[in-house]
Image (spheres, grey):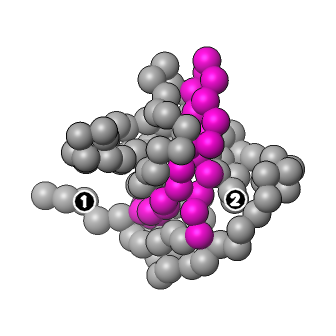
């Protein structure tokens, strides 16, 4: 499934409810050499407009990223899946001593998680 998220201005984005969820995330981006790089992090908090990661090695502001988040659905008894895979794209909008904030772009994809053999 592919969904479209409408553009949200910065002041509205900061007002969105944030959830302190620790979700395993694979973060991918192209480095200066145009080589694909990736790192695995845990989300610190997440909202409809973006996510914050605590990290000592933040990416540069405006870095375009792809996020792959794995979410266990065992709390949702109505779900057909045990684990969900959510793909986002976005960009780094802010960094500080604690980590970096990433703003989601217009689309995302939710699918059952398939283990790679």
Question: Could one spot residue 50 in this view of the protein?
Answer: yes
* Res. 6 mark: none
Q: Position of residue 51 (x, y in %)?
A: 61, 46
Left or right, residue 10 beside residue 75: right
* Res. 115 mark: 1
Above or below 95: residue 80 = below
- Residue displayed at 71% across by 46% down: 19
Residue that protrudes farthest toward the bottom in the picture: 1
Q: Which residues are magenta?
A: 82-106
* Res. 48 mark: 2
Above or below 98: residue 40 = below
Cα separation, mark 2 vs mark 1, equals 26 Å
Q: Tell which of 59 and 69 is nearer to you.
A: 59
Q: Position of residue 3 (x, y in %)?
A: 57, 79
Question: Is 60 covered by the magenta stretch?
Answer: no
- Residue displayed at 61% across by 30% down: 95
Circle 2 SS class: loop
Question: Is 99 covered by the magenta stretch?
Answer: yes
- Residue displayed at 69% across by 59% down: 48
- Residue displayed at 76% across by 63% down: 8
């Amino acid at each position: 499934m592919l969904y479209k998220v409408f553009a949200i201005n910065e002041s509205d984005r900061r007002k969105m409810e944030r959830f302190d969820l620790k979700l395993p995330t694979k973060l991918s981006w192209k480095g200066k050499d145009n080589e694909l790089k990736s790192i695995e992090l845990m989300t610190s908090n997440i909202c409809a407009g973006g996510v914050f990661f605590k990290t000592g090695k933040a990416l540069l502001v405006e870095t375009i990223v792809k996020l792959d988040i794995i979410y266990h659905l065992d709390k949702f008894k109505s779900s057909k899946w045990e684990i969900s895979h959510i793909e986002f794209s976005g960009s780094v909008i802010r960094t500080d001593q604690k980590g970096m904030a990433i703003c989601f772009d217009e689309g995302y994809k939710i699918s059952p998680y398939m283990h790679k053999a």
